[in-house]
Structure formats: C-alpha cells, structure tokens
Amino acid sequence: AQKITQTQPGMFVQEKEAVTLDCTYDTSDPSYGLFWYKQPSSGEMIFLIYQGSYDQQNATEGRYSLNFQKARKSANLVISASQLGDSAMYFCAMREGNTGTASKLTFGTGTRLQVTL
Amino acid sequence: DGGITQSPKYLFRKEGQNVTLSCEQNLNHDAMYWYRQDPGQGLRLIYYSQIVNDFQKGDIAEGYSVSREKKESFPLTVTSAQKNPTAFYLCASSPKGDRVQPQHFGDGTRLSIL
C-alpha cells in the first residue's frame, strides 16, 4: 500500500487565487511528521512546511499552510495568493517514528502546479 | 554560504562502468542521504548515513554503494550491477537535534547511459 498518496497529477490555478494540493498518508505509528517540498524545473528540492503528528495547530509559513486532518490522515497544502513563481512540482513526504539523528522520508508522486495569468 | 554541493550536474555512463557522484555539505549536518528520482515520480531512498563510518541501506540500495569517511562527504557509486541507472540523483542532509529537522537538498546530478 502507498504510504503517501497524491491524487492530483496536475493542477492549474490563476494568479492571486488560492489552491489546495491534496496529500493522504498511511501509518500505524503514532509519532510521525509530514513535510511538503517544492521542486522547480531546475530540480532542487525546497522545504516549505512541516506538521508533526502531535502538533495541536495547523502549520503555517507565510503563504503556505497545512490543513492537517489527523482522523482522515490527510495533510493538504494550501497556497494562498498564488504567484507565477509557484509553478513547480510539489511533493508530500512522511517521516515515521521518533528516530534518532536520521529522518528517513517517504515521498508521494507529486503534483505539478501551473499558475496562469 | 552554507549548502550542499553535488557534482557533476550531468554524468554519462558506459555499459559496465562504475561512476561516482559527489556530495559535499558545509552545514555541519550529521545525517546524509541519497535519493533517486525517475521521471514523473517521487524520490526513493537509496542509502543514508547518520554518522561518519556508518551507513544503512534504503529502499533501493541494490547496484549502489556509498562511503562516509568524512562528515562533510557522502559519495554515491553507481555500479555496473545497476541495470537501469538513468535517473536524477539527489543528495540531502539534516542536522541532529531533539526536534524534527527538514532535510536540505543539493541541486542534483542527472545520470544517463551512453
């Protein structure tokens, strides 16, 4: 079974509008973390936002917020006021367990976001 | 500026040849990782290392080898046993700490077969 599922291969959004990118996860571990990364066409992975399984509030970082619904096992990324520079691939990833130094991540297949004028 | 440097940016491999991808970080991070990305796919973990002189296999380690002789360096060798090496390879690192830290990534190396 897929541990991270991103069901939207591609999304379009108009500039200045908000967009939600879906992510569902599967784990039996009570301690886990969820990450969102952005990958522009140049290839580097840029960390956007993190949500811990025990965090009481949804994470926010500037225009990025995470809609964390623990019972539904979903961690959707919301981008407000989209900009042309937001066009990229977006990956959801999960770290299971309370590991020591290393944080092994499992990635979803990504969603390609295209921001239009 | 601190960061992760991967080299080369593009690499070509002949049949039966081993090639080594370089990854250097000056972030003073303890953990380092290698991922493989195929077109239209997410990243898959090849190897990771939590400390110098120690490393563990990830999900797709067959056909690859690594070493961690220095904290700053974590080279990946794609051996001739890896029959489908064409992919984008990303190196990452993360610091040690009590709270979860995101992984920082390099710019990647694109490997192709000649």
Image: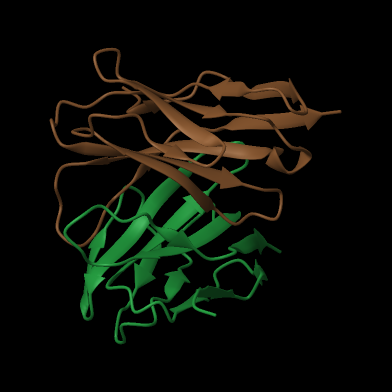
Chain colours: A brown, B green
Determine which quarter of the picture holds residue B51.
bottom left
Q: Residue at x 24, y 59 (%)?
A: A102
Quarter of the image with the C terminus of chain A in it: top right
Give the camera-side residue of B47 and A87: A87
Residue A85 picture location, percent across and down? 74, 44
Looking at the image, the residue that sits furthest to the right is A117
Front residue of this view, candidates B21 and A6: A6
**In the rendered image of this protein, does residue B78 appear above or below residue B23?**
above
| Residue B61 relative to residue A62: left or right | left
- Is residue B81 something one can see in this rendering? no
The N terminus of chain A appears in which quarter of the rendering?
Answer: top left
Q: Residue furthest top?
A: A72
Query: Does residue A67 lie above or below A65 as drawn?
Result: above
Visible residue check, residue B47: yes
- Image point 44% across, 24% down: which residue? A23
Query: As displayed, is residue B95 above or below residue A28?
Result: below
Q: Residue A78: percent from the left, percent from the top? A: 53, 27
Exactly how many numbered labels are in the figure?
A: 0
Relative image position of residue A34 (x, y in whole percent):
34, 37
Q: Residue drawn 15% across and 36% down?
A: A31
Residue drawn where x is 36% and y is 50% of the image: B60
Spot occupied by residue B29 in the image (x, y as percentages of width and height): 32, 73
Q: In this picture, is B86 found above or below A91?
A: below
